[in-house]
Image (cartoon, grey):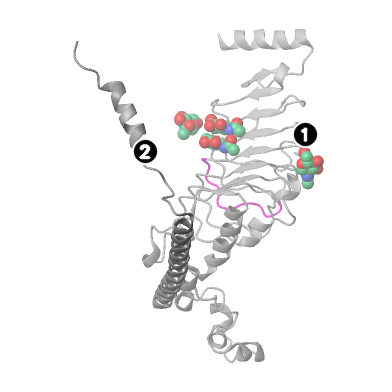
Amino acid sequence: MKGERLLLLSGIFLLQGVHSCPEKCVCHPSSNFVDCRHRGLTEIPPDLPPQTLTLLLQDNQIRQLPAHVFRSVPRLVTLNLSNNSLSHLAPEVFHGLRHLQVLNLTHNSLLSLESRLSHSLPQLRELDLSSNTISHLPTSLGKPWENLTMFAVRGNQLQHLDRRLLESMPSMRLLLLKDNLWKCNCHLLGLKLWLEKFIYAGGITDGVICGSPDIWKGKDLLRIPHELYQPCPLSVPHLAVQQHGVAHEEVPKSPENHNSGERDPVSCEVKPKPRPTNLRHAVATVVITGVVCGIVCLMMLAAAIYGCTYAAITAQGHGGPLVQTSDSGKTGGKEVFDHSPA
Ligand SMILES: *[C@@H]1O[C@H](CO)[C@@H](O)[C@H](O)[C@H]1NC(C)=O
Ligand SMILES: *[C@@H]1O[C@H](CO)[C@@H](O)[C@H](O)[C@H]1NC(C)=O
Ligand SMILES: *[C@@H]1O[C@H](CO)[C@@H](O)[C@H](O)[C@H]1NC(C)=O
Ligand SMILES: *[C@@H]1O[C@H](CO)[C@@H](O)[C@H](O)[C@H]1NC(C)=O
């Protein structure tokens, strides 16, 4: 039955003079669309038609991708690898896909992202890495990803995201970050500042909900006031705590500080203390606003009194009331409705 169908399909393709189609896939030659969804594939099928533009490989059990595996389909624009078993991407996997615009890697088991991915995929517009187990993303992709407008890492295990990574995606419009383990300490301040600029410039994001520390758990990173963040300790935490001048001055006193500098768990947490300063600012603002409003009101009142007095004096000068009572008009109107019974 299956064989018959394949034979028939092959026959059709031969008649149309089109390249062969992989055994387990369905090819739509008119649209250069190859559908290999849900076929129990464990590897990329060979013999993909070279003119393929869209390749659907979702819902299979592909575990790994050898380097240059997509060399035979250089015109590919959309590649869907959603819901497979990929845990690692070798550096050169997507090599040669110079025209790829959409890459869907959702629902795999990826742990990270290859740092030179942007070199292989210069035209990429949408990269969806949601629902993986990514706990770390590279700081930089090597060079700017000029055309990337959508980047999604929802449902992963990220605690931190370096703003330099986002800065290498200057065309970004949609950024999906929800459902991660965001650690809202001083190291996330860069992301917060970047997001504020991004949103101000019209970018769309689904937000960063803190997973830790406990005081911010469940809170939106963007709603935590800046004042509550201390600058991150410099490479030498002990000196950095002191005055600026001292921090620049000298070589570290004790060598073990070198290691703790990167992620010092204590000095790194946000401090919830400066809240009163914030409150005082708010109160001062309200008081000042009140005083200014009061002054403006008094001036308006004075102007009104002056205007009225002037008008009254002018009216007296003319020797008669300014406005005539509309008595006649009223009675006239009444008469219309006031008819006696027949
Ligand atoms: C993922 O693919 C498997 C087949 O490999 C399928 O049974 C399952 O429904 C798919 N899951 C989703 C969320 O589509
Ligand atoms: C990729 O596959 C998923 C699952 O079938 C689907 O929801 C999604 O729309 C596809 N995306 C693209 C770009 O083909
Ligand atoms: C990727 O596939 C998922 C489903 O697995 C879908 O929800 C998502 O919209 C797709 N992403 C893109 C960019 O098409
Ligand atoms: C970005 O897209 C434009 C228009 O499609 C294209 O001309 C340009 O070469 C792309 N940039 C890169 C780095 O490929």
Let me know if residue 111 is in the magenta part.
yes
Q: Position of residue 136 (x, y in %)?
A: 56, 58
Farthest residue to the front: give it: 319
Please identify the dominant SS of the magenta region. loop
Is residue 43 toward the left or the right of residue 225 in the image?
Answer: right
Farthest residue to the left: give it: 341
Q: Is residue 205 above or below residue 238?
A: above
Q: Is residue 330 above or below residue 130?
A: above
Q: Residue 61: name its quadrant.
A: top right
**In which quadrant of the rendered image does the C terminus lie?**
top left
The answer to whether residue 62 is visible is no
Q: Position of residue 181 (x, y in %)?
A: 45, 57
- Numbered-mark total: 2
Q: Residue at x 54, y 89 (%)?
A: 242
Q: Mark 2: which secondary structure?
A: loop
Q: Mark 1: which secondary structure?
A: loop
Magenta segment, which residues? 107-116
Mark sitting earlier along the chain (1/2): 1
- Separation (CA) of disc 1 from disc 2: 88 Å
Identify residue for label 2: 326
Amino acid type for the residue under numbered disc 2: Ser
Q: Is residue 243 above or below residue 265?
A: below
Q: Position of residue 277 (x, y in %)?
A: 43, 78
Identify residue for label 1: 74
